[in-house]
Amino acid sequence: MISVNLHELFNTIEELVMHHSPSGVEGEIDQLLMSRFAELGVEAWLDRAGNAIAKIPGKSSERAIAITAHKDEIGAIVKSVGKHGKVYVRRLGGSFPWVYGEGAVDLLGDRATIRGVLSFGSRHVSHESFQKMQQEDKPVIWEDVWIETKCTSEELDVAGIRPGTRMVISKHRKRPIRMKDYIASYTLDNKASVAILLYLAANLKAPAVDTYLVASAKEEVGAIGAMFFTQRQPLDALIALEICPLAPEYPVVDGIAPVLLSQDGYGIYDEGLNAEISQVAEELQIPVQLAALGSFGSDASITMKFGHVARAACLAFPTQNTHGYEIAHLGAIANCLQILNAYAVVDWQV
């Protein structure tokens, strides 16, 4: 088994979290990943869809598998730039303004990043102000909010703030915190899984077949990167690394035990592949939980639904507050790594 220091794992995830990567504007995280792959001496490249891919040659090149972890994060996208420094945005992926709350956000302009404040309006108001409904009748939605920049229209234009500009939580709000053996942060979905790819790139030696480690692009808006990759690269199997929501409706408990999905909102996963992964976990004496999720999708389920791969699985770590300020056990993340590192060296067709 790989020796995984939880302190070092935390630091790796923290570094990834602190690199912005809203869907479709992922250059900041791409530079870091390509640098890390180069340091590790593995063959790596960025494809035309924006996927950051590392290839670990197998003992046999007759078949191949892929392990994916999407590198993009949710946020918002600018709809219009108004007067007096106000910018109006809409959701990018599964984001909600009430999750972020009022506070600093970064607008990633073409030429400069502008810091603004996600604003909901004053609370000391009567029913004459629409904000009163937010206190009594309904949650805050993107159509109700704006970003206050205190910039002139000319200053925003110079920075390249325009319709289509991405908005993400400011970096000083994103920095993870340690809670015993837990990590808490925005964008653990899916930066913690990308950390697993980096550990695999460093430790996976002589897998049974060619193994592609894919930090996939634009997953939160339709698994676009994974669809592009799997359309061009024949695969025997694809395993997606993900978060698994902790909620009363699912029989998933918090802690160190990873989760194998049987089904999600896009369809079923491959039972044979799940059985192979479960067998490896049992041999490693790592407990694994099973779950069928509703409002969820992954690179694996989406690419299998559209016929790009015949066999797909999703291995996840239990996470609180998904698509919010997420909390996950570092031990569960490390156990996902251990399982996949051991799985990749077995020739399952022998």
Image (tube, rainbow, N blue to C red):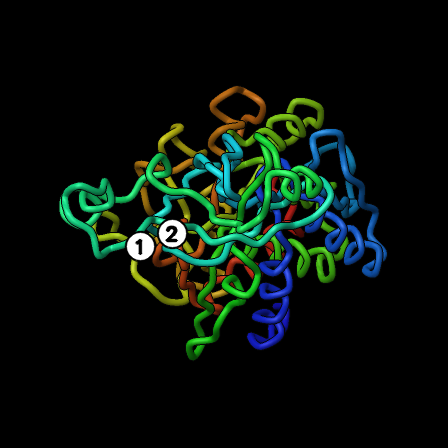
Q: Is residue 268 above or below residue 185?
A: above
Identify which residue is drawn at 39% across, 50% down: 119
| Marks 1,2: beta carbons within 8 A | yes
Left or right, 126 with reference to 110: left
> Which quadrant is the N terminus positioned in?
bottom right
Q: CA distance from mark 1 to mark 2?
A: 8 Å
> Mark 1 falls on what kind of element?
loop
Horizontal arrangement in the rendering, residue 158 relative to residue 280 (left or right) = right
As displayed, is residue 186 above or below residue 265? Answer: below
Few, some or many residues within 10 Å of mark 2 (<14, 14–19, 20+): many
Give the SS element for disc 2: loop
- Nearest the viewer among 239 and 195 is 195
Residue 128 locus on image (x, y percent): 17, 41
The vertical placement of 202 against 302, above or below, is below
Residue 350 coordinates in the image, percent (x, y): 64, 40
Residue under label 2: 322
Picture coordinates of residue 347, whole percent (x, y) = 65, 44
Say which of 181 and 164 sits in front: 164
Under mark 1, the amino acid is Leu
- Which of the two residues, 303 or 165, is positioned nearer the viewer here? 165
The answer to whether residue 350 is seen in the rendering is no
> Which residue sits at x=33%, y=63%?
254
Q: Which mark is residue 246?
A: 1
Residue beneath the point at 61% across and 33% down: 162
